[in-house]
């Protein structure tokens, strides 16, 4: 089992160390392989997480909210804009930002009160379980020189040109040989994926907007939708919204 990787971002050195030690306690008590890295402020965390390869390995981000520079909510928003799919847990002295946490798909929101230790352990174990489950939902793609394991939830879309397939994920791209039929087999049963053109298969969850037979994905790519696929795409989007 690969270790759970955790990023701890808090400008207060005592509290940063407190949660780092709590992670070590969980690691030893629950026998969970784990690696934790500490960040003094949001800018340093974002600097490291700009790299898609680094970002894809971080399972859980623990974020203080009231920090100098970008606060925790702003940092989380930028992480999501980068394409980060992992769990974000806010740990803060204030409960005034909990509504904002929904906007960045936070896993939980913990206030630093008297029972923070017990509550943190419970929430962290839930997040670790979610991270392990998400890791298990991955696809393996191989080119002549490289093999990549790509989490399904991170995939924006596939494009195919003859037998060359490009998979777009986490603001990264990987090219390999296959066919659209084989790609559809790989995602069979996952109603998040829909074919919008003979050479393009997309994830509905990664659509940013749709207009005039064109979809814009959350990585900025604009993709044409065929006439015959347009109604099915609108139905899939409506199903997700409900």
Image (spheres, helix red, strand yellow):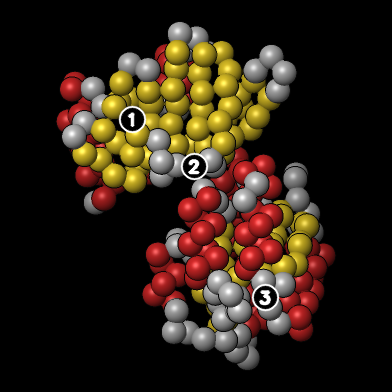
Figure check: 138 above or below 108 = above
Element at label 1: strand
Q: Do the residues under discs 2 and 1 have CB atoms within 8 angstroms?
A: no
Residue lying furthest front:
69
Figure check: 176 above or below 84 = above
Q: In this view, does 45 lie to the left or right of 154?
A: right
Q: Which callout, 3 or 1, points to the residue nearer the camera?
A: 1
**What is the quadrant of residue 112 in the picture?**
bottom right
Q: Name the residue under label 3.
A: 10
Disc with the residue nearer the chain's start (2 vs 3): 3
Whole-percent x, y for residue 182 in the image: 47, 15
The residue located at (75%, 50%) in the rendering is: 3
Whole-percent x, y for residue 136 in the image: 60, 40
Figure check: 119 above or below 185 = below
Q: Which callout, 2 or 3, points to the residue nearer the camera?
A: 3
Q: Can residue 169 be seen in this view?
A: yes
Q: Which mark is residue 223?
A: 1
Q: Residue 148 carries which label?
A: none
Q: Is residue 19 visible?
A: no
Structural crowding at the residue carrying mark 2, measured as other residues with C-alpha within 10 Å and reported as few (<14), some (14–19) or many (≥20): some
Q: Name the residue under label 2.
A: 153
**What is the quadrant of residue 4 in the picture?**
bottom right
Q: In this view, does 189 lie to the left or right of 15?
A: left
The residue located at (58%, 27%) in the rendering is: 174
Disc with the residue nearer the chain's start (3 vs 1): 3
Q: Quadrant of the N terminus?
A: top right
Disc with the residue nearer the chain's start (2 vs 1): 2
CA distance for labels 2 and 1: 19 Å
Structural crowding at the residue carrying mark 1, measured as other residues with C-alpha within 10 Å and reported as few (<14), some (14–19) or many (≥20): some
Element at label 3: loop
Q: Which of 167 and 22 is in front in this view?
A: 167
Element at label 2: helix
């Amino acid at each position: 089992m690969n270790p759970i990787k955790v990023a701890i971002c808090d400008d207060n050195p005592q509290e940063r160390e407190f949660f780092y030690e709590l992670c070590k306690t969980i690691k030893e008590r629950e026998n969970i392989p784990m690696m934790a890295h500490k960040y003094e402020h949001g800018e340093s965390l974002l600097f490291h997480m700009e790299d898609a390869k680094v970002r894809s390995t971080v399972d859980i981000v623990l974020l203080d909210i009231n920090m100098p520079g970008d606060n925790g909510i702003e940092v989380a928003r930028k992480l999501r804009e980068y394409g980060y799919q992992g769990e974000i847990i806010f740990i803060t002295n204030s409960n005034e930002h909990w509504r904002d946490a929904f906007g960045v798909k936070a896993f939980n929101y913990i206030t630093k009160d008297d029972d923070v230790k017990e509550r943190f352990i419970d929430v962290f174990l839930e997040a670790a379980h979610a991270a392990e489950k998400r890791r298990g939902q991955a696809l393996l793609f191989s080119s002549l020189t490289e093999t990549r394991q790509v989490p399904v939830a991170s995939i924006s879309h596939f494009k195919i040109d003859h037998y060359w397939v490009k998979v777009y994920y986490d603001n990264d791209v990987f090219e390999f040989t296959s066919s659209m039929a084989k790609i559809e087999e790989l995602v069979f049963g996952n109603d998040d994926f829909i074919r919008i053109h003979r050479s393009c298969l997309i994830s509905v969850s990664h659509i940013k907007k749709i207009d005039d037979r064109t979809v814009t994905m959350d990585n900025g790519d604009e993709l044409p939708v065929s006439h015959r696929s347009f109604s099915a795409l609108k139905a899939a989007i409506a199903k997700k919204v409900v």
